[in-house]
Amino acid sequence: MHVTEFFNYNFGQARGILRTINPNKSDCIQNFKAWEVIPENKELDVETIGTSEGSTQYKIYDQSENVSKQFMMELFVGNSPNP
């Protein structure tokens, strides 16, 4: 299943955001990508920083200071090795 999510953040000072995803036990997460949509439209660097008890945590890098931003995240969740 293809998933697209939008999140709004108000930053004081930050180097990015974290997103934790916990799919069903038989499912896997593939092709996780993130973009800053507002105020700029750009793809962001993503790092998988941890997996435990079926959850995967992603660090999305985007230096920010005193700004509101909207992010879009896309991923594939399913039990297929290739979406």
Image (cartoon, rainbow, N blue to C red):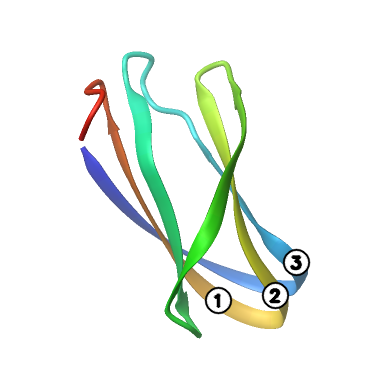
The amino acid type of the residue labelled 2 equals Ser
Task: Residue at 66%, 82% (x, y): give it.
Answer: 67
Q: Which residue is mark 3?
A: 14
Relative image position of residue 76 (x, y in whole percent): 29, 39
Structural crowding at the residue carrying mark 3, measured as other residues with C-alpha within 10 Å and reported as few (<14), some (14–19) or many (≥20): some
Of mark 3 and mark 1, the one earlier in the sequence is 3
Relative image position of residue 41 (x, y in whole percent): 42, 79
Query: Does residue 49 appear left or right of residue 34 in this picture?
Result: right
Query: Are circles 2 and 3 on residues that touch, CB within 8 Å?
Result: yes
Residue sitting at the far right: 13
Mark whose residue sits in front, 1 or 2: 2
Query: Does residue 37 appear left or right of residue 78 in this picture?
Result: right
Q: Which residue is mark 1?
A: 69
Query: Are circles 1 and 2 on residues that touch, CB within 8 Å?
Result: yes
Looking at the rendering, in which quadrant would you find the N terminus? top left
Location of residue 29 with respect to 15 vertically, above or below: above
The amino acid type of the residue labelled 1 equals Lys
**Element carrying mark 2:** strand
Query: Are circles 3 and 1 on residues that touch, CB within 8 Å?
Result: no
Location of residue 82 with respect to 41 vertically, above or below: above
Q: Residue 83 lies in what quarter of the image?
A: top left
Task: Residue at 36%, 25% (x, y): give it.
Answer: 28
Marks 2 and 3, Cα distance to the nearest angstrom? 5 Å
* Residue 64, numbered label: 2
Task: Residue at 60%, 79% (x, y): give it.
Answer: 68
Which of the two residues, 19 or 32, is positioned nearer the viewer here? 32
**Element carrying mark 3:** strand
The amino acid type of the residue labelled 3 equals Ala
Marks 1 and 2, Cα distance to the nearest angstrom? 9 Å
